[in-house]
Amino acid sequence: MSSFQIIVGSMLGGSEYVAEACEETLIAMGHEVTLHFQPEFEQILSENQTWLICTSTHGAGDFPDNIQSFVTDLENSNKDLSSLKFFTIGIGDSSYDTFCYAAKNLNKLLITKGCVEIIPLKTLDMSADIDPEERSQAWLNKNNDLL
């Protein structure tokens, strides 16, 4: 099976719960998974890997503090990421006009760096009455053939 690096951007912990639920599902599918709650770009495997980005948005469309240096290092990197596949889950509140901006912006950045998006961006609206962990697990199961 595949090797997954789950990269978490979180201020209040909601993204961490979603990431852990995704980890559980991917392991049940037989994949190798490493979870990064304090992601450091140079420490995360990228060669022939699949990255799952799970991030919330903070403030006026900003990245959470714990993922800011990762994003800056990614922006400044000249590393060949063409073998890297990825997909993104954004957690946010649609009553804000910056709904899931961090996820959307990181998604765009990865594409500009030559990474291959294997599943379109998934957004989870926390203003709705949903179980984000359950939704993310169902979404992974639905897209199992793409993983």
Image (tube, rainbow, N blue to C red):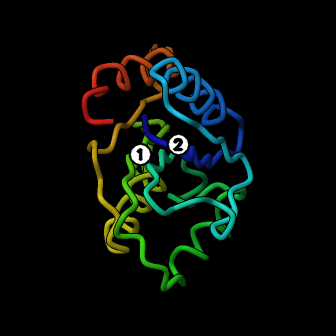
* Residue 109 lies in quadrant: bottom left
- The residue at which mark 1 appears reads as 88
Residue 30 in percent (x, y) is at: 48, 24
Q: Residue visible at 66% across and 41% down?
A: 35
N-term mark: 2 or 1: 2
Against 32, is 137 above or below?
above
- The residue at which mark 2 appears reads as 54
Q: Residue visible at 50% across and 21% down?
A: 25
Give the label on residue 119, or none.
Answer: none
Quick check: 95 left or right of 32?
Answer: left
Against 140, is 146 above or below?
below
Cβ atoms under marks 2 and 1 closer than 8 Å: yes
Q: Nearer the viewer, residue 64 or 25?
A: 25
Residue with the most extreme front position: 1
Residue 67 in percent (x, y) is at: 65, 59
Mark 1 neighbour class, 10 Å CA radius: few under 14, some 14 to 19, many 20 or more:
many
